[in-house]
Image (spheres, helix red, strand yellow):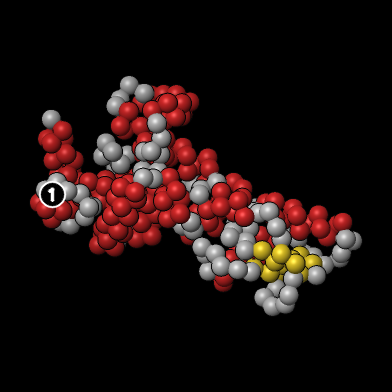
Amino acid sequence: MILTCTFDPVTKNEISFIRKYMKEHRMKDIYVKVEGEGVLSKRIRQKLLQKAVQPYRHIHVCKEGEGMAMQGFRDEEEMIRRGHFYLAADGIKKILCENGFYFTNIMEAMCTKERIIHSYGVADMAKELAEFYGFDPEIAYQMGLLHDITKRFDKQENEKIMQIYHPEWLDISEKVWHSFTAVTWVKQNMGLHDHRILNAMYHHTLGDGHSPYCHILYMADKLEINRTYECERERKEAYKDLYKGAVFVRDSANRHIK
């Protein structure tokens, strides 16, 4: 017997359905197959499915053969693609985060059209800066995509998160709150715990972080190509020295605010 689904990605409930189907039909072994188009390539989805069923030695992944389509899981898969990784099957959540799978989908689902353009600009410049200074370009790109994902939240929604998780920052401008609430959101919903990404996101508005990734994200946020204000001098400084460039950009931003 072969059960088929898009598995884009594999959900906890899909695994539960497969196991229940085996039990109800008194089957010793069952085969599952990735079928249909998805956000991720079929090859990647097959690898994720293989990882998800690995603990169950009587569930096997196959690539050929006709099967019965599993119904009713499309909405749940979509929720995972929008960032609710806790719904994904055990064994693949960490892989989703480590590879940045669905990060663009999450950002586009969470942000306005203008913020989407900005976030892609930040991600591109962060990746370029990371490559220039010898740091991980994929990590830089991922933090650029995610840095503003809670900026669309209204004041009440952000304030609720702040009161619980970041009360020490309630007195500063609400325009900065998304730096902190975005970190909470990705940790709770995505299970993302890479300190390089989280630390950079946390400090990206005030520019008070000290890690290389903090400097990279801060400068990329202020200087990405879609910014309409004049910042050519700041862009040049950004590629001379990572630390000094970040200080120069922060000082320029503070002068502009004053």
Q: Is residue 35 found left or right of 233 in the rendered image?
A: right
Viewer-nearest residue: 85 or 202: 85
Q: Is residue 258 found left or right of 34 in the rendered image?
A: left
Picture quarter containing residue 92?
Answer: bottom right
Give how far across and how far down residue 145 sits, in percent: 37, 52
Q: How many marks?
A: 1
Instruction: Tell me if I can see residue 198 in this picture.
Output: no
Q: Say what secondary structure mark 1 lies in.
A: loop
Instruction: Check disc 1 and report the residue beneath it.
Output: 231
Q: Residue at x 58, y 66 (%)?
A: 45
Q: Residue at x 31, y 52 (%)?
A: 117
Q: Quick check: 37 above or below 177?
A: below
Q: Quick check: 166 above or below 249?
A: above
Question: Looking at the rendering, in which quadrant would you find the N terminus?
Answer: bottom right
- The residue sitting at the bottom extreme is 64
Viewer-nearest residue: 101 or 38: 38
Q: Quick check: 91 above or below 250?
A: below
Question: Looking at the rendering, in which quadrant would you find the C terminus?
Answer: top left
- The residue sitting at the right extreme is 26
Crowd rating for badge 1 (residues with CA inside 10 Å; few <14, some 14–19, many 20+)? some
Viewer-nearest residue: 191 or 151: 151
Q: Is residue 109 found left or right of 171 in the rendered image?
A: right
Q: Residue at x 45, y 24 (%)?
A: 163
Amino acid type at circle 1 is Cys
Give how far across and how far down residue 124 sits, in percent: 30, 58
Give how far across and how far down residue 83 sits, in percent: 51, 48
Q: Is residue 4 found left or right of 193 in the rendered image?
A: right
Instruction: Tell me if I can see residue 113 in this picture.
Output: yes
- The residue sitting at the top extreme is 171
